[in-house]
Image (spheres, helix red, strand yellow):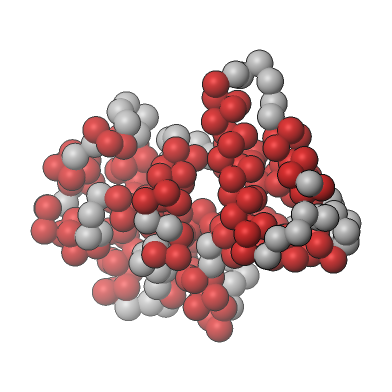
Amino acid sequence: MMYQSLENFSLRKINFVKTRTTILKAVTNLLKQEEFSAITVDEICQKAQISRGTFFNYFSTKDHIFHYYLRIFTIKIALRIKLWDKDMSLEDKLKDIYAWFSEEKQYSRFLDSYINVILNVGEEANEMKLIDAEFIYFFNGIEEDEYAYYNSLTMGKIFEQLCIEAKEKGEITLKASNRELAALCTGVIAATYVADTLNKEEKHLELFNRVWKA
């Protein structure tokens, strides 16, 4: 990994970013050989060449590594959404998002882990935040006064905004609150993934997207 973008930060912050990204890289490499549930903290430490004490200085549990990656991934999604055509339909937006989720290669079986977080923790409970040096390292174009916003951003909030816009355009006739509609977006993504996994011969997103006109 290259860290030249961090040259204006203190050595402490540079080392912080290096260590967290080294741990993340170690996990993504281990995921090429085994399931996340089978990976141990000792394996991660060996791969990252750090001590267990160092590991727990940066991540309270092994699961927090995915929470950290989810924070980065969600911000990446938000930045990609900014490039959408303003006339794009809700169904096409969800198609894009589903493709981004499904095609994610850096974190193996990303959707499985995301669904697990939704069911067992909840996105709002994700305590992993990026420091200023990480925003500079991972992203271009995010201003300092936006850091708090992006650190609190969830896919649920992104879905809620998409539904607000879709309701204004008449694309959603289903009578439900914005929060419930956002939950349905998550459900559409998860249900499509499960159905596509069970039957790889068919694509199911179009079927589940009919919910908006119910």
Nearer to me, 150 or 201:
201
Residue 49 to residue 148: above or below: above
Give the residue at the far top of this rendering: 201
Residue 207 to residue 93: above or below: above
In the visual, does 48 lie left or right of 82? left
Nearer to me, 45 or 109:
109
Residue 57 coordinates in the image, percent (x, y): 19, 64
In the visual, does 153 lie left or right of 107? right
Classify residue 182 by image quadrant: bottom right
Answer yes or no: is residue 36 visible.
yes
Give the residue at the far bottom of this rendering: 145
The image shows a total of numbered marks equal to 0
Classify residue 180 by image quadrant: bottom right
Answer yes or no: is residue 139 visible.
no
Give me the residue at 44% from left, 38% from top: 112
Residue 91 coordinates in the image, percent (x, y): 78, 45
Give me the residue at 59% from left, 55% from top: 183
Residue 33 to residue 66: above or below: above
